[in-house]
Image (tube, helix red, strand yellow):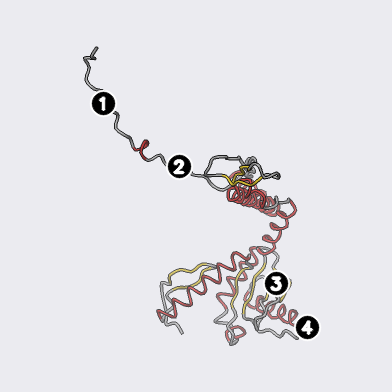
Amino acid sequence: MLNGRGPRVKRALTETDSKDAPPKFVAYEDYRALYDHVLKLTRQVNELQACLMETCSTKVSERLSSACPMAQDPPAIGEPVFCHSNNDVFSFPSANGDESRPTSYAEISSKNLPKPLSTLSIAQEAAKMLDKATRAVIERFPDSKDDPEQEKRDLEFFSTFSAKHGLPSPSQAHRHPSKTACRPLKLQFASNSDRDKFLNGFFKAKNADPSLSSIQSRPRARRDLTREELKKLYESRKFVYDNNLKEKSSKFIMVDIEYKLNKNPRPFL
């Protein structure tokens, strides 16, 4: 018996039907490395904040506590999930050679996970950063590596320089080991603000004070930096030098470890 209705109309294929995009995943090793990095940064920030709150005034400490509360550690991540699909496994023969055992990428990558961070290592890293915050570094300052009194002479020079210009005086001077002709000179100050005042005074006086302007190596000063910051500093200095040499003018200038356009460029010699 015939059906009075017309033929069935086939549903047209949709975008989802024709192009079913496969799900995207991140390797467990990469995710775990990112998690550990975030955890390390969180704890370092908390350690730094706690140290700052101990050293600053009560008013500043209260404002810091309310504006930036201590961050909580991110939730712990679980073990890798084994995926036994054909596209996400490795097959390894069993001991008797009869069967193969599917093993996920997560299982392979999780064997080389970084060691968990200890509270002691975090505290030590925070202490180093706080210590660097009170030090200035003088580069290209005349140096005699064979002179056992070199650091004493350095301290006397910059104590006199500071007194002359009304700047905070350093309490210690230390030559950092280096293969360069003039080892970097590290000057220790009582606080971060004293260090910053000294650096600002140094920049203003270095061209006007004959005790510095007469030195052929043209000493320069900066704050004490971490390894990552030093790498950025060297990259920025190279960029500035190469481009200023190309333009034959001081088109770019350094600001801390970054560079910017110079509003009043001069001929670059």
Does residue 114 appear in the picture of this structure?
Answer: yes
Q: Nearer the viewer, mark 3 or mark 2?
A: 2
The circle drawn on residue 9 is 1
The residue nearer to you, when weighing 158 against 42, is 42
Q: Earlier in the sequence, mark 3 or mark 2?
A: 2
Neighbours of disc 2 within 10 Å: few (<14), some (14-19), many (20+): few
Q: Position of residue 137 (x, y in %)?
A: 64, 72
* Labels 1 and 4 touching (C-beta < 8 A): no
Mark-to-mark CA distance, 3 and 4:
19 Å
* Labels 1 and 3 touching (C-beta < 8 A): no
Q: Earlier in the sequence, mark 2 or mark 4?
A: 2
Mark-to-mark CA distance, 1 and 3:
89 Å
Mark-to-mark CA distance, 3 and 2:
63 Å
- Residue in the image at 55% along x and 44% along y: 88
The residue that mark 2 highlights is 22
Relative placement, left or right, of 166 versus 119 is left
Callout 1, which amino acid? Answer: Val
Q: Earlier in the sequence, mark 1 or mark 3?
A: 1
The residue nearer to you, when weighing 216 against 195, is 216
The circle drawn on residue 148 is 4
The circle drawn on residue 170 is 3
Quarter of the figure with residue 9: top left
Q: Nearer the viewer, mark 1 or mark 3?
A: 1
Q: Position of residue 117 (x, y in %)?
A: 70, 51
